[in-house]
Amino acid sequence: MARLSLATLNEIPQSAQPSVDPRAISDGMVHLGLGAFHRAHQAVYTQLAMAATGDTSWGVCGVTQRSRDVVERLAPQDGLYSVLQRADTTSISVLAPIRDLLFARTQSDELVARVAAPTTRVVTLTVTEKGYRHDPASGRLRADDVEVMADVDGRSPQTVVGQLVRGMQARQRAAVGPVTVVCCDNLPSNGRTLARLVADFCDLLPPAESASTRAWIDEHVRFPCTMVDRIVPSATDADRADAARLLGVDDRGVVVAEPFMQWVIEDDFAAARPAWEAAGAIFTDDVAPYEAMKLRLLNGSHSAMAYLGVLAGYEYVADFVRMDDVARFVRALMDLDVSPTLDVPNGFDVVRYKDELLARFGNRALRHRTAQIAMDGSQKLPQRLLGVIAERRAAGETPDHALLAVAAWMRYVSAESNEHGSAIDVDDPLADLIKQRLDGARDARHVVDRLLAIEQVFSDRLRDDATVRVQLADYVEALASKGVRSTVRELAR
Ligand code: CS2
């Protein structure tokens, strides 16, 4: 079967044709972290915006950081790929915004040059939480990270923050105008967090370079905060087979997504941008209420279901949450623990939002793996669950549901296998440290104490809270002795 490409585009059905002619698109953006999420989210908004306005100057140079895989899938396809939308019905459409591809490991000088190109007015990022090389608890750049320090010392930059700073220095040298850096990862105050990491990197540079780079960035670069949302499970061979059947050509770059998508963006741009509002994005002065809502309600529930689900032997979120006690537990987590911490945006119907979330989690057409969400827990827990626990404790409450979710993470990283004896493979940048800390832990109390001592993840406040320690230990013990279902059932309201 022929491969999707500019040459075969005329072979695909009319209904799947991109809404913008790829040949008409010129360079406008650089995207760092060309994973499935960008392709199913920002690229879709960008295509819709170009189609709505006719301004086709927002093509994307997509950069992959760690593996060539996506470049190898998309390069023979001239950057074209499809989004397979799955719910009760399935639909497919081809996306055209990605016009260039770079692999940062071997092309980081080209990448710096692209960031510095006069046509580049926006740089977007989806590099996952760990891609920022920061301490999740403090939000500061890890100056003890060898990769960060190698970038500071001046090699062709390999870390995301290093790439941004070197790109900005190249813009400064070439006297190219202002640019906006749009962080689209699930970090708290993601724009501000990234701006601080960039400033931390500048502070590590030699004094002469440091001050002038910081001053240029302060004057010419904006880092708006954003809330991004779309559930995008990893694509499988079955998805690729379905795409081929629907398109009539082979697409090795297909991404799978739910119909729902949302993007809330702080209206703080240094230069021009795509008219993403024409595609439904919301521009606002303050993203914080939307962000807290999404990170705590959606991602917090996701992490809870991921650890509990893996422990109970459920491979997919939808199968796990379709059990009544699990759905009621998740709803109680949202209602009793998370909701009291939220400052709901004006006019926003949070009850409906929670109903929709449960329906989205239960979408069986999406094969969203619990193990995919369980990855990198050390980088995700603070913004998803620990903030909720700290705020409820400060209000004198004991957030049992959120504590059970964190206990499930603790059990997940400390048990070798799940309830059915299948091995648990902890994929986390702190996996070695976690293992080291757990060495010799004999019971649930030890496990909790050892893990709470990891200061990259847990704050002093949580560590020193006796109620939190005792409750976590009880839950870790209950998960081990009684199992997931009966522990969850006791907390399902
Ligand atoms: C998930 C997110 O893998 C995960 O950690 O919680 O990728 C989630 O699907 C997205 O944030 C939804 O917008």
Image: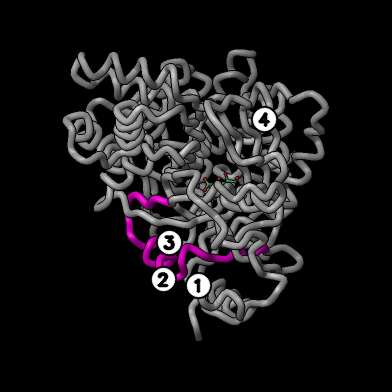
Foreground pick, 292 / 227: 227
Alpha carbon of mark 1 to alpha carbon of mark 4: how far? Answer: 38 Å
Question: Which class describes the residues within 10 Å of circle 3: few (<14), some (14-19), or many (20+)?
Answer: few
Question: Does the CB distance between marks 1 and 2 fall below 8 Å?
Answer: yes
**Residue hosting label 4:** 290
User: Closer to the N terminus: mark 1 or mark 2?
Assistant: 1
Q: Is residue 88 above or below residue 230?
A: below
**Residue hosting label 2:** 76
User: Closer to the N terminus: mark 1 or mark 4?
Assistant: 1
User: Closer to the N terminus: mark 4 or mark 3?
Assistant: 4
Which kind of residue does numbered mark 3 sit on?
Gly
**Residue hosting label 3:** 421
Residue 460 at what x, y percent from top left? 41, 16
Residue 370 at what x, y percent from top left? 53, 54
Foreground pick, 288 / 284: 284
Question: Does the CB distance between marks 1 and 4 fall below 8 Å?
Answer: no
Does the magenta segment cover residue 66? yes
Element assignment for label 4: helix
Judged left or right of residue 455, residue 472 is right
Which numbered disc covers residue 5?
1
